[in-house]
Image (spheres, grey):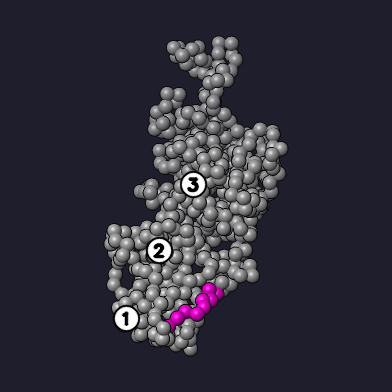
């Protein structure tokens, strides 16, 4: 555990803890021979995994069902434990304190909320209010040599795996003599869409069940004239999947532990680490027809086997295309507790110039100039929506569904990732709102522009344009049914309406690109 451990007297401000490591609480010093009998000790801890898992809707995770079960809970909601003690607990004499530390954190810090010291108190005790972190540990009942304690992590706690220690000493003693109990397994804490204080809270219970707990679904492929559903198994509760998802947060890419409180940062990170180009993430993309060194994208039927293979070998898995990236991203987000669903856009633009147009260049003979034609249009493209509030964008009501895209198409701030972009902002043509609104707006709204190119010193000549082709039949699985739901109207106004043209003109003015034409 290192040196960041608990004590029971005095207060420690974050600034002090950061500037003087001597002020950080240290492990209790075992008493000298013959003097330890008077200090209460924690002999064993019963985490009541099955009961807590049912209350927190985590009972389907394989971790909670294995022979030696591990506790998985959702932040902001209480969980109960039983402390088996060496003798009867005397609240006036004995002091107990939980110490929770983010697993693997090299330098636990109060200011970064990667360590929490939580004194055990009673309802009437001021101790239950804990420290600045907002954790509480309240004795519910005491009997013989056992305590029933209810622990509540704050609704904005870091998501991931935490280590748990329990320190004990005598209240009246000013030295650091005491005992420490270290629990052998970590405690996993997830986002909580059932808790109103959590930034991923979702009020619609049917949608919440669909986008957090459903283990299978449909991902739409094909073309706008032949929409074809593909059954996909998300498997977010299967063996090693949650462990892999936490590994992706902690060890792949550059996401700090404090950032794991925020679904905006977590979902942006997920869009980066599900693909492989920058950080040796989960899946290698392949858009050729040569798959002999791996599994072809059409060979995958679900996410669990991909994540299990990655977690076992710590190497990218071959191969994937957009629906595979989206399926795996759905699994990772749902496993962590963020509501998510895959979304398919037909006739989807890939705008390489950030011009909000798909530009095609032709010479005087009407031949395409391939070296200039970098933009493209996919028959279909699949990304994800993740549900969360967006306090970073307020005021303006940008919360709700956010688009993220794990397929490595264009770099964002030097990394192949995309989003989260507020779907509401996309429809309003507010393309400069973080993150990557310009790219996603173009995917569903770009105009197709055809140019005659006569040389670098000659002006481009507009041949024609098509304004109503990009972004058709935007699809996702319907809630509670294995059917298609059309969500095109959440991304854009109907084609051939003044509202649609006004939105496009607004976006083009914000874009101000040389290729953009109003």
Q: Nearer the viewer, residue 348 or 165?
A: 165
Crowd around label 3: few <14 · some 14–19 · many ≥20 (10 Å): some
The residue labelled by disc 1 is 173
Which of disc 3 and disc 1 is earlier in sequence?
1
Q: At which x and y percent is residue 448?
A: 53, 26
In the image, the segment drawn in magenta is 39-48
Q: What element carries label 1?
A: loop
Q: At which x and y percent is residue 438?
A: 45, 36
Q: Which of 502 and 261 is in front in this view?
A: 261
Outermost residue toward the front in this view: 33
Which of disc 2 and disc 3 is earlier in sequence?
2
The residue labelled by disc 3 is 253
Disc 1 to disc 3, C-alpha distance: 46 Å
Q: Nearer the viewer, residue 19 or 235?
A: 19
Q: Which of 502 and 115 is in front in this view?
A: 115
Q: At which x and y percent is residue 47?
A: 53, 73
């Amino acid at each position: 555990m290192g040196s960041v451990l608990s004590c029971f007297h005095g207060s420690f401000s974050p600034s002090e803890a950061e500037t003087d490591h001597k002020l950080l609480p240290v492990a209790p010093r075992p008493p000298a021979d013959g003097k330890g009998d008077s200090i209460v000790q924690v002999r064993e801890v019963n985490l009541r995994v099955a009961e807590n898992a049912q209350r927190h809707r985590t009972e389907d995770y394989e971790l909670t069902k294995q022979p030696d079960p591990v506790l998985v809970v959702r932040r902001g909601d209480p969980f109960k434990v039983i402390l088996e003690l060496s003798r009867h607990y005397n609240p006036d004499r004995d002091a107990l304190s939980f110490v929770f530390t983010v697993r693997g954190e090299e330098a636990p810090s109060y200011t970064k909320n990667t360590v929490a010291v939580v004194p055990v108190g009673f309802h009437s005790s001021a101790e239950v209010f804990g420290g600045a972190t907002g954790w509480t540990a309240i004795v519910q009942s005491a009997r013989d040599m056992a305590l029933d304690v209810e622990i509540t992590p704050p609704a904005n706690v870091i998501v991931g795996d935490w280590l748990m220690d329990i320190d004990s000493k005598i209240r009246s003693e000013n030295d650091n003599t005491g005992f420490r109990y270290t629990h052998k397994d970590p405690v996993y804490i997830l986002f909580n869409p059932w808790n109103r204080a959590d930034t991923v809270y979702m009020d619609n219970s049917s949608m919440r069940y669909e986008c957090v707990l459903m283990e299978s679904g449909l991902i739409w492929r094909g073309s706008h004239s032949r929409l074809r559903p593909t059954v996909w198994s998300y498997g977010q509760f299967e063996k090693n999947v949650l462990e892999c998802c936490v590994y992706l947060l902690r060890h792949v890419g550059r996401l700090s532990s404090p950032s794991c409180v925020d679904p905006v940062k977590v979902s942006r990170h997920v869009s980066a680490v599900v693909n492989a180009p920058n950080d040796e993430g989960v899946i290698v993309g392949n858009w050729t027809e040569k798959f002999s060194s791996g599994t072809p994208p059409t060979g995958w039927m679900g996410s669990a086997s991909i994540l299990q293979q990655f977690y076992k070998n710590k190497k990218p898995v071959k191969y994937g295309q957009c629906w595979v990236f989206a399926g795996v991203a759905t699994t990772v987000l749902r496993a962590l507790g963020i509501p998510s669903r895959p979304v398919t856009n037909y006739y989807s633009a890939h705008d390489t110039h950030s011009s909000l147009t798909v530009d095609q260049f032709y010479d005087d003979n009407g031949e395409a100039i391939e070296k200039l034609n970098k933009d493209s249009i996919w028959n279909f493209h699949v990304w994800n929506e993740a549900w969360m509030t967006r306090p970073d964008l307020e005021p303006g009501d940008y919360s709700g569904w956010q688009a993220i895209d794990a397929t490595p198409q264009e770099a964002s701030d030097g990394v192949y990732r995309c989003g989260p972009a507020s779907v509401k902002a996309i429809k309003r043509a507010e393309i400069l709102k973080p993150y990557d609104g310009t790219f996603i707006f173009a995917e569903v709204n770009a105009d197709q522009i055809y140019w005659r190119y006569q040389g670098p010193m000659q002006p481009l000549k507009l041949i024609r344009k098509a304004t109503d082709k990009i972004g058709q039949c935007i699809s996702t699985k319907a809630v509670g049914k294995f059917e298609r739901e059309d969500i095109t109207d959440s991304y854009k106004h109907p084609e051939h309406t003044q509202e649609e043209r006004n939105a496009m003109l607004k976006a083009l003015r914000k874009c101000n690109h040389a290729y953009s034409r109003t």
